[in-house]
Image (cartoon, rainbow, N blue to C red):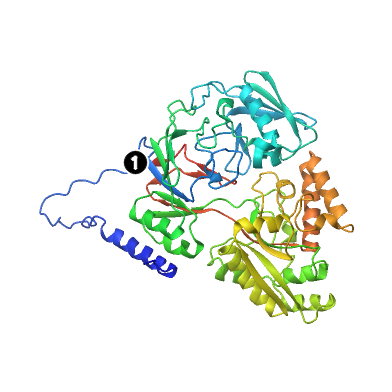
């Protein structure tokens, strides 16, 4: 008999209490003699630093679809344990050397030269050289092989080998987002090209032992890893457990050491479990949003779009849809970005009277009827839409919700077959140009929301973005992006709601795990304290 979904949190809580009850009894307090009448053995001292050895068992949710690092498919956040790139995103939101010990950009901004470390080996034993980076760039420029990563190299023209450990990557025009692409240019040996989807080979701290689809992935320590002393773990096992409640039960029972995808409804409860640590990836440029197709009535009217912005109660959405656990936003840039337009905070507030007045001015004093396409049949996209639907009803807008399974959803999105959509958009990039180069909501090309067909404000919007993308002056770029974001807000087709962040939970003995702005999981520094 299937367990009803609402019972799962109770089961999880009960299991947590049972685990706590089975824990060893607390030692006697000071001055109290042990009940056995003899001196208790001293507790072993807790490790004060990284300890080698051990097996880490994780569940990321669904099983892997492919290990090809140029795909962004299921578990795309698990590339770094196997593959590495010339540089990586640092903890302060910049870049730091990785496979390359240094890099520089030419004065004209058209060439980035990488100086590779010597002696780095692939899992097959061969040394990494400049030839591998040149081939990797060729692979990513081939859209049949570059897949999702190709979008980050649209202005790259190729790479040139200068010597065995020096490579120049060339661009047709200044690309301020180039380093974001290079930080995701995971290098694999050319000889693994045809088999990488199921037999990954990289330079990362762990190498493939076996993958049994639907059951487990096992990685083992790469003995020739280039970072001295790392990794600390001997083995990493990843188990597919699609159901989030089942993942939590496995975590509390001790059959896994960590999980990704903590339901926001259960986050607060899990935080109360003594030996579990709940954390989340840093906010990037990826966010939940309501987005309108401005070629569909009544959203072809700017006043209507502005009214829709004033009808969003983010506090209520946070409490009812995200269980008070989300980081809400009205802007498409995070405060951590140097392009964050602080003066535009509060551009829209929750104001139903203002929304109703704008609808009347637009010619809809009694409101209107519309339909919202929902990303997925259930989950946060539907939950936040249901809260929004209630407030829209108060200003006369009757919005029917259309939950849509993912295989049917994306063709409708790409074909612009909707009036308004509950969607996730944005790009996890260090450089702010990513919002306008990769995010479907905001890019001035391949846009699904009808903005490129506008002849009034869109030309200025595109000109600002184009100029910012080629300027080498950060202050000038900040001003240009500010003006582009202001147009985005004034036109109102995109309504940012909350940041999309990965919430994960680990047993307290798991130490040293790192996630970055891109959500990547870094295991090279992970160790177990017990």
- The residue positioned 53% from the left and 31% from the top of the image is 202
- The number of numbered badges drawn on the structure is 1
In this view of the protein, can residue 435 be seen by the observer? yes
| Residue lying at 61% horizontally and 25% vertically, measured from the top left | 132
Please identify the quarter of the rendering in which residue 223 is found: top left
Quadrant of the rendered image containing residue 302: bottom right
Q: Secondary structure at mark 1?
A: loop
**Image location of residue 247, percent across then percent down:** 42, 55
Is residue 228 placed above or below 512 in the rendered structure?
A: above
Q: Is residue 42 left or right of residue 50?
A: left
| Image quadrant containing the C terminus | top left
| Residue 70: % across, % down | 61, 39
Residue closest to the eye, 370 or 430: 370
Identify the residue under disc 1. Answer: 47
Quadrant of residue 85 within the rendered picture: top right
- Residue at (89, 59) in percent of width and height: 456
- Judged from this view, the residue extending furthest toward the left is 37
- Across and down, in percent, residue 87 comes to 61, 34
Q: Position of residue 215 (x, y in %)?
A: 41, 46
Looking at the picture, does residue 311 appear above or below residue 217? below
Q: Residue furthest bottom?
A: 366
Q: Specify whether residue 313 is in view.
A: no
């Amino acid at each position: 008999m299937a367990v009803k979904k609402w019972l799962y949190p109770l089961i999880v809580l009960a299991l947590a209490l049972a685990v706590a009850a089975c824990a060893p009894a607390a030692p006697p307090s000071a001055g109290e003699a042990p009940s056995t009448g003899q001196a208790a053995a001293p507790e072993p001292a807790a490790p004060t630093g990284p300890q080698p050895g051990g097996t880490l068992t994780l569940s990321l949710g669904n099983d892997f679809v492919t290990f090809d690092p140029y795909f962004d498919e299921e578990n795309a956040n698990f590339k770094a344990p196997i593959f590495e790139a010339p540089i990586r995103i640092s903890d302060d939101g910049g870049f730091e050397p990785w496979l390359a010990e240094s890099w520089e950009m030419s004065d004209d901004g058209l060439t980035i030269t990488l100086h590779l470390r010597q002696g780095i080996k692939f899992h097959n034993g061969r040394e990494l050289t400049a030839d591998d980076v040149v081939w990797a760039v060729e692979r990513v420029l081939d859209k049949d092989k570059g897949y999702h990563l190709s979008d980050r190299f649209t202005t790259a023209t190729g790479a040139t080998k200068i010597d065995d450990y020096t490579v120049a990557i060339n661009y047709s025009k200044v690309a301020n987002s180039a380093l974001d692409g290079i930080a995701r240019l995971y290098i694999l040996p050319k000889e693994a090209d045809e088999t990488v989807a199921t037999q990954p080979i990289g330079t990362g701290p762990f190498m493939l032992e076996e993958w049994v689809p639907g059951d487990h992935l096992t990685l083992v320590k790469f003995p020739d890893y280039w970072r001295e002393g790392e990794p600390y773990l001997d083995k990493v096992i990843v188990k597919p457990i699609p159901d989030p409640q089942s993942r939590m039960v496995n975590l509390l029972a001790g059959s896994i050491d960590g999980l990704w995808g903590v339901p926001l409804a259960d986050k607060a409860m899990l935080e109360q479990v003594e030996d579990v640590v709940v954390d989340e990836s840093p906010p990037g440029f990826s966010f939940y949003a309501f987005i309108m197709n401005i070629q569909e009535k009544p959203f072809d009217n700017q006043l209507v779009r502005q009214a829709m912005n004033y009808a969003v109660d983010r506090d209520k959405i946070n409490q009812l849809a995200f269980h008070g656990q989300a980081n809400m936003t009205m802007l498409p840039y995070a405060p951590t970005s140097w392009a964050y337009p602080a003066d535009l905070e509060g551009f829209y507030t929750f104001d139903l009277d203002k929304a109703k007045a704008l609808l009347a001015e637009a010619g809809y004093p009694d409101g209107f009827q519309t339909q919202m396409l929902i990303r997925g049949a259930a989950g946060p996209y539907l939950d936040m839409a249901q809260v929004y639907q209630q407030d829209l009803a108060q200003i006369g807008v009757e919005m029917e919700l259309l939950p849509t399974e993912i295989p049917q959803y994306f063709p409708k999105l790409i074909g612009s077959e909707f009036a308004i959509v509950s969607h996730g958009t944005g790009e996890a990039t260090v450089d702010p140009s990513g919002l306008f180069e990769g995010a479907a909501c905001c890019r001035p090309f391949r846009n699904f929301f009808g903005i490129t067909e506008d002849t009034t404000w869109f030309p200025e919007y595109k000109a600002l973005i184009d100029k910012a993308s080629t300027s080498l002056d950060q202050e000038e770029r900040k001003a240009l992006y500010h003006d582009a974001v202001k147009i985005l807000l004034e036109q109102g087709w995109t309504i940012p709601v909350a940041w999309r962040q990965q919430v994960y939970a680990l047993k307290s003995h798991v130490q040293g795990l790192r996630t970055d702005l891109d959500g990547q999981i870094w295991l090279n520094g992970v160790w177990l304290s017990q």
